[in-house]
Amino acid sequence: MRNLDIDGVHDSYPNRAVFIQGDAAATGPINATITGSALTNGNSPGGGIEIDNAGDATVTALVENNTISQVTGDGISIVDHDGAGLVNATIRNNSVSLDDAQAGDGIDVSAGGDADPGTATVCASIASNTSTTTAAGKVGIRIRQLGAGTSFLLAGYGGAPGDDAAVQAFLSAGNAGASAAADHAGAGFSPVDSCPLPA
């Protein structure tokens, strides 16, 4: 088991502010708590907080009370792909404000990757965030269920799994009216009461 507690980072880093990766070599669960940080990259290439689970690891993360600005990737990016991994992600009370034309989405959570979706499972709780981006074609919150073999569990959602418009409305209502996008290629977004938190 690996436990990562990242609290109160106030700095800028090249490429990514915070990067956590689970891969084929990862053994045991990874627990990550990222709270109370002010992250900026001066609009240089790179994102904010990124969790990339490329393999079969179990990653359980709490991303809470962070302020993210001036990054050109996604503000918060969580992706589970290329294997049978599991990501439990609770994303709450964060402030993401992206003002660069090359920025990505404010918050992006994906079960499966574009190249190799795998049979990944994501459980996501996304609530009480403010998230904006001025980049063309990007949104405050984007979630994706890619590939027929992946699963996306969405905490608090009560609609039909395949109703992307209802998912978008749910995300917007629970996150200060943030613009939202959702798309699926399989079972869609399954309702669940909550997602596990880091031990």
Image: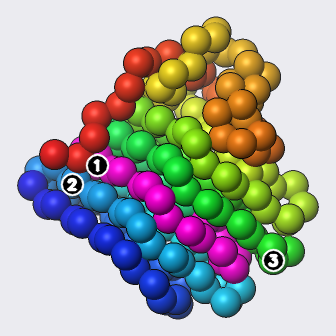
Residue where numbered disc 2 is placed: 30
Residue where numbered disc 1 is placed: 59
Front one among 49 and 69: 69
Q: Is residue 68 magenta?
A: yes
The disc labelled 3 sits on which kind of residue? Asp
- Mark 3 lies on a secondary structure that is loop
Position of residue 157 relative to residue 94, above or below, is above
Q: Which residues are magenta?
A: 57-75
* x and y percentages locating residue 127 in the rendered image: 55, 39
* Structural distance between the alpha carbons of marks 1 and 3: 30 Å
Asked if one can make out residue 153 in the rendered structure from this viewpoint, the answer is yes
The answer to whether 194 appears left or right of 139 in the picture is left
* x and y percentages locating residue 40 in the rendered image: 59, 82
User: Which residue reaches farthest right?
Assistant: 136
Position of residue 72 relative to residue 157, above or below, is below
* x and y percentages locating residue 195 in the rendered image: 35, 31
Residue where numbered disc 3 is placed: 100
2 and 1 marks in contact (CB < 8 Å):
yes
3 and 2 marks in contact (CB < 8 Å):
no
The disc labelled 2 sits on which kind of residue? Ile
Residue shown at the point (49%, 53%) measured from the top left: 78
Q: Residues within 10 Å of mark 2 (few under 14, many from 20)?
A: many
- Mark 2 lies on a secondary structure that is strand
- Mark 1 lies on a secondary structure that is strand
Residue shown at the point (22%, 65%) measured from the top left: 4
